[in-house]
Amino acid sequence: MDIKKKLEYQSNYWYNDGLKRAQIQDMTGAIASLRRSLQYSQSNITARNLLGLLLYGRGEVAEALVQWIISRNFQASGNIAEYYIQKVQSSKSELEVINQVVKKYNQCLQYCSQGGEDLAIIQLKKVVTEHPSFLKAYQLLGLLYLHTEQYGKARQVLRKAHRLDTTDPITLSYLHELNRAQKKKAVSIKEGKEQPAVSYKLGNETIIQPAQGVRENSPMFTIVNIAIGILVGAAVMWFLIMPAVNQSKSQEANESIVEASDQIATQKSEISALKKELEGYRTKSDEAQTAKETAKSTQSSYEALLDVTTKYAAGTESNQNLASTLLSINKDSLGEDGKAQYDKLADSIFPSVCRRQYNRGIASFDVKNYDTAVEALAMVVKMDEEYDDGNAMYVLAQAYEATGDTNNAKTYYQKVTEQFSGTEMAEEAQSKLEALNAAADQNAANQNAAADQNGQGAEDSSSQEQDTTE
Amino acid sequence: MLNFEEELKKFQPSLEVEDIEKAVYQEDLTDMSEILKEVVEKSK
């Protein structure tokens, strides 16, 4: 076996070793084996292609392309490297994004060398978001978190890096350092009572965290917190709960007022309806009373008319009494037949009675027996107002005036002036009426003057009494 | 305890796409057979 064959065998041996390691995610070991394989034979395109694939898996796309391009140069046809290259180049936007991410990573390295860890952390967060398989970015970010003692974040980042490559020495060393640092921190927390404060660096800033024991063990803070809580509770009660309670109370009061108003309105309407009903009953009662009285009057009128008719026919009663009975009859309450009967009797009885009573009245007036004159002449006027061309009424008025009954006197003087106007008797009645009115006015004036004098006299006497008292 | 500065030195700039061609040319493609050839030639 010549040397060339032996070298190829050796190269294949390391290729197989690299393949085994790659299958168990031992990327670093696989890459080392494959590079060794290529040292034995640069033309081992299988080993080179696998090396490119592993570099691609760690996020180093440009390095992977370098290996695949070299592989293609060794064997242009039937080489899977050609497929890989085309696959990467087909998505130019993705390649451009990865290129930008790589540039940012390189920029982060510059930030770190210049002391800008905080900027580098921010930039690296973006890098790992845009290119999640970029192993070196995770490792650098983990280192920065370790440096700033952000151990929780460092652990998260380093776990992702460990998933990409389980045997990368950098990742493993950082994880080891992380565990050590956290153990140290746990011990320091246990001994924290003795430490006044915990300080750590975040970028350029040094953050000093005060020890918790100070707050927990201070009774003053507890009292202040309770007082603040009470104040806040009172403020909430005053500004939020009380207005709502007051509003609900006022709303209930308004509702009760509205309900009471409705009840009052209902009762008012009921009262109004009852009043109307009562008025209706009263009206009906009045009407019934009137009807009753009318019926009574009608009955008595008919009875009197029947009585007069019977007595007049029998001739047992004087005309004077019959006339009196007839005058007591309410003629309006009679029917047509009754009225006709009344007129018939009146025509038969009244003339003789009028003549007799008129003579009696005039005679009594002449002897100044005014009461008898009034009685007789009143009956005459009642039977016939125009008797003796109104002279009976005129003398009646004078008799009334003589008895001092000025109201009846005025009434009959007025009737004489109206019913017999243009006669001498009417003029005399008018003058007598005016004289009565003037006398009445004079009396009223005299009474007022007397009342004024009495009032003045009373005031004078009271003032005199007052002066005396003083 | 890690030395931050020393650790930073382990991180080298990653290869950008524009530099691929240059990297291809700079790749050392010397293998064991070529070294042996050189050794044999020098021994002659």
Image (tube, coloured by chain):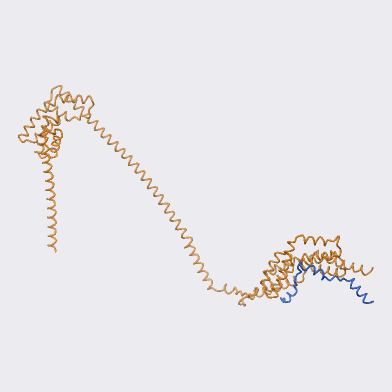
Please state if A32 lies on the left or on the right of A205 as rendered. Answer: right
Specify the chain shown as orange. Answer: A
The residue that appears at 14% across and 56% down in the rendered structure is A459
Q: Quadrant of the N terminus of chain A?
A: bottom right
Residue projecting furthest to the left:
A367
**Towards the viewer: A194 or A286:** A286
Residue A147 pos. (x, y %): 69, 74
Please state if A295 lies on the left or on the right of A316 as rendered. Answer: right
**Towards the viewer: A108 or A462:** A108
Residue A185 pos. (x, y %): 67, 74
Residue A11 pos. (x, y %): 87, 68
The hue in which chain B appears in the rendered picture of the protein: blue
Please state if A368 lies on the left or on the right of A224 as rendered. Answer: left
Q: In which quarter of the image is the C terminus of chain A?
A: bottom left
Residue projecting furthest to the top:
A314
Q: How many marks?
A: 0
The residue that appears at 49% across and 63% down in the rendered structure is A236
The residue that appears at 13% across and 62% down in the rendered structure is A467
Residue A329 pos. (x, y %): 19, 29
Please state if A344 lies on the left or on the right of A125 as rendered. Answer: left
The residue that appears at 85% across and 61% down in the rendered structure is A79
